[in-house]
Amino acid sequence: MLKTVPELVAEARTDLRCVDAATATAEVNENQGTIVDVRELIEVENLNAPHSLNIPRGILEMKITELVPDENHPIYLHCATGGRATLAAEQLKRMGYRKVTVITCPIDTVMEQQKLLSLG
């Protein structure tokens, strides 16, 4: 029986760490983790989360190791609603990354919380 995307996402989340944007922001302020936006470039151009590194879901596995080479570096993934971020996080865990977190709230909430990041 084929699974729907919502079913895949729900199943993947049982094995992933998921947080809201406020929790992710607080943690990144402490641990200097990397926030990765897995949306497509056109989506980012239309609605930008400025403190996120954009690596579209379709090329994530090819790019992430050069941009985040440390398997123990905290990575926080987001997209527009959390679905693609969840599937991306599942792949990063399979690749060997150990501190992968999904931000599960809508993009506008992520953007609002990023205003509270302490950069530097």
Image: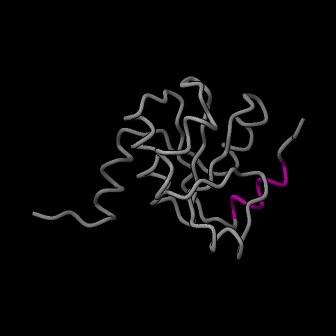
Quarter of the N terminus within the rendering: bottom left
Who's the residue at 74% across and 66% down the image?
Answer: 48
Residue at the spot x=63%, y=72% of the render?
A: 43
Q: Is residue 44 above or below residue 65?
A: below
Residue 42, percent across and down? 63, 74
User: Looking at the picture, how far across and down is residue 20, in whole percent?
Assistant: 61, 50
Name the residue furthest right.
Answer: 120
For residue 10, side relative to residue 32 (left or right): left
Residue at the (53%, 47%) spot, across then down: 102
Q: Position of residue 29 (x, y in %)?
A: 79, 35
Give the extent of the magenta segment.
Answer: 109-116
**Residue occupying the far left of the picture:** 1
Residue 54's image quarter? bottom right
Q: Which residue shows up at 55% across the image and 44% down it?
A: 63
| Magenta span includes 119 | no
Seen in the picture, residue 99 relative to 53 is either above or below; the reply is: above
